[in-house]
Image: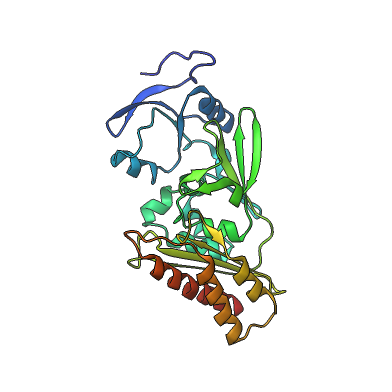
Amino acid sequence: MPRACVPALLPCGTTTATLGSVPVEYVRPKALDEALEALAAFEDPTPLAGGTDLMVEVNLAHRRPTAVVSLRDVDELTRWDEHWIGAGVTFARMEQAPDTALAELSRTVGSPQIRAAATLGGNLGTASPAGDSLPFLAAADAHIVLRSVTGSRRLRWDEFLTGPKQTARRPDELIVGVELAPRPERQAFAKVGVRQAMVISAVSCCVLRDPSGETRVALGSVGPTVLRAPRAEEVASHAARLTSSDLDEFQRRVTEEVRPITDHRATADYRRHAAGVIARRALERCLR
C-alpha cells in the first residue's frame, strides 16, 4: 500500500515493493520534475528505465537497490530530434535513426524484446566498455546532459565516462539526454562477438568521415572506457582520397592505440588485431 507522503523525506506515491526478493522503496513519477524530486529524496536511489541491465545485476546478486525511481512514464525523456536524443529513447526506435552508424549499432543490441525496452540513458548509465551506443557517441563528440533539483550539467562523453562502469553522475542526478553536433552522412559501425546475434561485443568501432576527409574513429571493449584513436584519425584525415598504404597505416595505428584486456570473451591480442581490421573495414565503407 502507498505510504503517507512525508514532505522533504519521501515523494508521494512511494510504495514498498520487491526487486527480485529484495524489499525496496519504489516510486513511479509522471514527470521529469517529479523524478528529480524522488532522486533527491532518497539516500542512494536507482533510476530504472528499461531494466535490461539492472535486472540482470539484481538476479545475479550484484546489486541490492534500496530505492528505485521508475522512469517509464516520464515522457520528457523520450524527445528526439536532429541534435538531441532523450535518455528514454529505446534502441528499437533508434533502429530507424537517420544516422547510419546509430541505426546499425541499434540493430545489433540484444533481441527485439531487449531493444524494445533498453534505452540510450541506460546504456550510458551502465557505462560498460562494451556499451554499443558509446562508440557512436564518442565519435560524434556527444555531450551528456544531467539534471537534478539543484540544476543541470553538460559533460563531454569523455568527462562523463570515468572508468569501467563508472560515470561522473551524482546519485541525485538523472541522465536526461545527449546533445549531438552536426554529423557527416558517411558513417559506419562494426562489432565482433563470439556469435552473430544477441552478443556482447568483444570489439566495436564507429567511424565518421566528412566530405573534407576529416575522420573520427572510436572503439569499444578495448579499454577501460570507449576511446578515440587520434593517431589513426590523423592518417585518415590527411587527404580526401586514401591509398592502400594509408589504409594499412590507419589499421596499424588503431592496433597500437587500443588498450584491451583478456577476459572470457576474447584475448587482448585478438581484440587488438580485430580492432584494426574492423576499423579499416568501417573506414572503407565510409569511402564508398
Residue at position x 51%, y 22% from top? 41
Q: Quadrant of the N terminus?
A: top left
Picture quadrant where residue 284 is located = bottom right
Residue 9, compared with residue 53, is above or below; it is: above
Residue 194, given in percent of the width and then of the height, sits at 33, 66
Left or right, 34 with respect to 111, comes to: right
Residue 28 visible in the shown view = yes
Residue 185, given in percent of the width and then of the height, sits at 64, 68
Q: Residue lying furthest bottom in this view?
A: 244
Residue 157 visible in the shown view = no
Residue at position x 52%, y 31% from top? 30
Residue at position x 39%, y 27% from top? 66
Residue 9, compared with residue 52, is above or below; it is: above
Q: Quadrant of the C terminus?
A: bottom right
Residue 92 or residue 185, whichever sits in front: 185
Q: Residue lying furthest right in this view?
A: 212
Left or right, 156 with respect to 13, comes to: right
Residue 39, given in percent of the width and then of the height, sits at 52, 28
Residue at position x 56%, y 34% from top? 173
